[in-house]
Image (tube, rainbow, N blue to C red):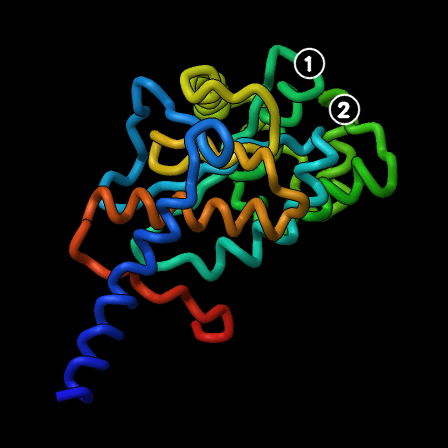
């Protein structure tokens, strides 16, 4: 009987652990409510958005951590990035740059290189010509890039990104938003790892709201394809 009782107690503890972690979260300290909640691109999954800018040095520092973290997210989480403009010409230029690279399928290859060029090498990627010169030096066809850079699709994405940032009450970057409802605040965090750990907790909170009786799926193993 003791054996069965111990197994029962262990099962109860394991069940309550996710809820105990969520109970530690506090509005204002760990996350802020986004009201009204914003629609997501993939309602079937918990969407996490990183609002960022190539112009932001903190985003540059965080980027390697985010790349590794995003590769291990559970299957029920969808991650995407949204560049912000903040009405600042340089930030707006970088948003256009990001969506242009995305349009031609070069974000994955050149993402870290853009951050490095701006924040480590100090290159002045400050206008159309400097951007074109830089991407062509990376092996990108100038016309292919220019066509994307001046396309209606890129301009539409920039406009939508600005609207989403405003609706999500983004005041600075990097900023993480979970499922269009929670802005990760993290007043007490002291490192990039702590920010992502807190984001995981907010994801767990949202998962329990969506599926209160379903255990979270395991994280992906980045070594497995």
Residue position marked by numbered label 1 in the rendering: 89
Q: Residue at x 72, y 47 (%)?
A: 113
Quarter of the image holding residue 8? bottom left
Q: Secondary structure at mark 1?
A: helix
Q: Secondary structure at mark 2?
A: helix
Q: Residue at x 35, y 53 (%)?
A: 20
Residue position marked by numbered label 2 in the rendering: 129
Number of the front mark, 2 or 1: 1
Q: Is residue 23 left or right of residue 84?
A: left
Quarter of the image holding residue 142? top right
Report x, y in % for residue 156: 44, 19
The C terminus is located in which quarter?
Answer: bottom left
The N terminus is located in which quarter?
Answer: bottom left
In front of the other: 218 or 70: 218
Q: Residue furthest top?
A: 87
Could you tell me how far apart the alpha carbons at marks 2 and 1 are, in whole angstroms?
A: 15 Å
The number of callouts visible is: 2
Report x, y in % for residue 43: 24, 39
User: Which of the marked residues, 2 or 1, is nearer the chain's N terminus?
Assistant: 1
Q: Is residue 99 visible?
A: no
Q: Residue furthest left?
A: 1
Whether 61 is drawn above or below 151: the answer is below
In front of the other: 41 or 98: 41
Whether 150 is drawn above or below 61: the answer is above
Q: Residue at x 33, y 45 (%)?
A: 205
Q: Is residue 61 visible?
A: yes
Whether 190 is drawn above or below 18: the answer is above
Q: Residue furthest front?
A: 2
Q: Residue furthest right?
A: 122
In front of the other: 17 or 69: 17
């Amino acid at each position: 009987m003791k054996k069965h009782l111990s197994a029962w107690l262990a099962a109860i503890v394991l069940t309550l652990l996710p809820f105990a972690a969520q109970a530690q979260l506090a509005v204002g300290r760990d996350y802020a409510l986004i009201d009204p909640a914003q629609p997501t691109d993939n309602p079937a999954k918990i969407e996490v958005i990183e609002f960022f800018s190539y112009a932001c040095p903190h985003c540059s520092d965080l980027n390697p951590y985010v790349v590794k973290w995003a590769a291990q997210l559970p299957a029920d989480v969808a991650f995407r990035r949204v560049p912000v403009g903040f009405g600042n010409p340089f930030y707006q230029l970088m948003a256009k740059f990001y969506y242009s690279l995305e349009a031609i399928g070069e974000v994955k290859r050149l993402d870290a290189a853009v951050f490095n060029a701006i924040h480590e090498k100090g290159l002045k990627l400050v206008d159309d010509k400097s951007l074109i010169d830089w991407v062509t030096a990376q092996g990108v066809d100038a016309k292919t890039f220019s066509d994307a850079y001046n396309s209606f699709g890129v301009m539409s994405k920039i406009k939508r990104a600005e609207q989403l940032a405003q609706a999500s009450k983004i005041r600075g970057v990097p900023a993480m938003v979970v499922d269009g409802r929670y802005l990760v605040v993290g007043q007490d965090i002291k490192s990039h790892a702590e920010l992502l750990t807190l984001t995981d907790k907010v994801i767990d909170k949202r998962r329990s709201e969506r599926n209160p009786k379903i255990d979270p799926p395991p994280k992906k193993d980045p070594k497995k394809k």
